[in-house]
């Protein structure tokens, strides 16, 4: 890979034109979306898409999402738009919902990792859509982190992971949702939620009452899950620190976390506690990284907090489990994956 000196440009009309020029030359550019930062390339240029995999260190069996700016961008990418897709697109596009649909022959195999389906999303972020329009092509983009690291929710996170690997990062400030889009497989019958995100399960069920949740959302991978979404089998969102999720009755969870923390400290292990802001005072003078007031705010701050753990030299994070309603499902999914599904019940002996 050619080493780049990576430039960070605040979003402006000129910066978007510059980014579009780089994309037209087959380069890879990082850009903001309302979920997380993406690492984009021309989805119809096989060589450009390969550069995404190189820059991320991403296994080539993990397919990418193709981003479009208008509804007219969808038709060329798919061989069929199933009737249940229409109300979903009307309700949630542009926005944090990715639809898995049967692919057309135009989408290169490298984008879909050889699958006969393609993931498509229309982002709500104005800079993302301006970039897609300026490029005049659909943009394939995974999250702009090095493979396995927490997804970037600010331009400086992209720089931490991608300095020297890509020519340009468009800086649009902090991402609104802070977790990746909801991924919904409409080629399965009944449809399956593969990854929870900003569009909640409850909101989707108003349109798809028979929607199933993939078992890999809240539990370690079973044998079948790998085939359903190849991305699920790779370790994700992992800081260097060990993350342990504590589940159970709220009062018992807090007592358990306090005792695990004190035990770690007695063994010279630097620990931090991840919890809702309102419970931080209950932990006294222990190190607490409060995530926010509600599940939505907590999800938005999770990835930057996982990065902060490593920067601040913590080697253990003890996290309170969240309820899995609304945005809590996306929060628990990312937390459990960061923990490599390591959890303990508050009433369990260590
Ligand atoms: O919010 C987002 O979705 C961000 C922004 C940049 O748009 N992108 C993102 O991409 O999170 P990535 O590559 O980090 O995650 C895409 C997920 C992976 O788990 C991948 O396996 C899955 O979508 N995926 C992509 N194409 C698929 C397909 N055809 N079938 C099943 N899963 C697919
Ligand atoms: Mg990712």
Image (cartoon, rainbow, N blue to C red):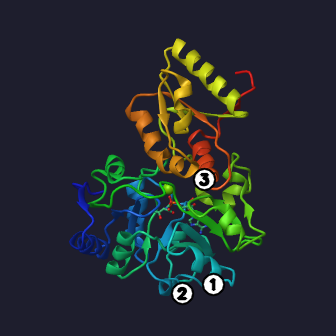
Which callout, 1 or 3, points at the residue further toward the start of the chain? Answer: 1
300 above or below 133?
above
Q: Nearer the viewer, residue 103 or 328?
A: 328
Q: Is residue 158 left or right of residue 108?
A: left
| Other-residue count near label 1 (Cα within 10 Å), few / some / many at <14 / 14–19 / ≥20 | some
Residue at image point 62% right, 46% down: 332
CB-based contact (under 8 Å), mark 3 and mark 2:
no
Image coords of residue 145 (percent x, y) = 42, 52
Q: What element does badge 2 sit on?
A: helix
Lower position in the chain sequence, tag 3 or tag 2: 2
Answer few, some or many: residues within 10 Å of disc 3's Cα (few below 14, many 20 plus, some between 14 and 19).
many
Question: How much space separates mark 1 and mark 2, taking CA atoms?
Answer: 8 Å
Element under disc 1? loop
Q: Nearer the viewer, mark 3 or mark 2?
A: 3
Q: Tell me the residue that label 3 is attached to.
A: 330
Residue 81 numbered tag: 1
How far apart, in angstroms, are the residues tagged by discs 1 and 3?
Answer: 27 Å
Q: Pick whichever of labels 1 and 2 is earlier in the sequence.
A: 2
Q: Quadrant of the C terminus?
A: top right
Q: CA distance from mark 3 to mark 2?
A: 29 Å
- Circles 1 and 2, Cβ within 8 Å, touching? The answer is yes
Q: Which residue is mark 2?
A: 75
Q: Image quadrant of ligand 1?
A: bottom right
């Amino acid at each position: 890979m050619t080493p780049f000196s990576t430039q960070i440009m605040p979003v402006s009309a000129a910066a978007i034109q510059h980014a579009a020029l780089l994309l037209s030359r087959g380069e890879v550019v990082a850009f903001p979306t309302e979920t997380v930062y993406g690492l984009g390339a021309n989805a119809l240029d096989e060589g450009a898409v390969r550069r995404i995999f190189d820059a991320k260190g991403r296994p080539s069996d993990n397919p990418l999402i193709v981003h479009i700016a208008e509804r007219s961008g969808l038709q060329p990418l798919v061989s069929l738009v199933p009737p249940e897709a229409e109300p979903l697109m009307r309700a949630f596009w542009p926005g944090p919902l990715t639809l898995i649909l049967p692919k057309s022959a135009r989408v290169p195999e490298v984008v879909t990792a050889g699958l006969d389906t393609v993931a498509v999303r229309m982002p709500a972020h104005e800079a993302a859509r301006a970039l897609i329009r300026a490029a005049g092509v659909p943009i394939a983009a995974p999250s702009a982190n090095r493979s396995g690291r927490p997804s970037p929710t600010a331009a400086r996170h992209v720089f931490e992971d991608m300095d020297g690997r890509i020519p340009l990062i468009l800086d649009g400030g902090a991402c609104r949702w802070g977790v990746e889009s909801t991924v919904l497989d409409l080629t399965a019958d009944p449809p399956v939620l593969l990854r929870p995100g900003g569009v909640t399960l409850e909101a989707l069920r108003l349109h798809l009452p028979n929607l199933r949740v993939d078992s890999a959302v809240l539990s370690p991978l079973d044998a079948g899950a790998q085939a359903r979404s190849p991305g699920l089998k790779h370790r994700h969102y992992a800081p260097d620190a060990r993350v342990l999720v504590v589940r159970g009755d709220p009062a018992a969870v807090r007592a358990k976390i306090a005792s695990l923390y004190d035990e770690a400290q007695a063994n010279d292990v630097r620990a931090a506690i991840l919890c809702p802001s309102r419970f931080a005072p209950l932990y006294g003078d222990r190190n607490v990284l409060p995530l926010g007031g509600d599940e939505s705010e907590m999800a938005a701050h999770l990835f930057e907090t996982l990065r902060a753990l490593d920067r601040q030299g913590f080697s253990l994070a003890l996290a309170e489990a969240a309820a899995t309603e609304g945005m809590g499902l996306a929060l628990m999914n990312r937390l459990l994956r960061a923990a490599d599904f390591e959890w303990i019940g508050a009433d369990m002996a260590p």
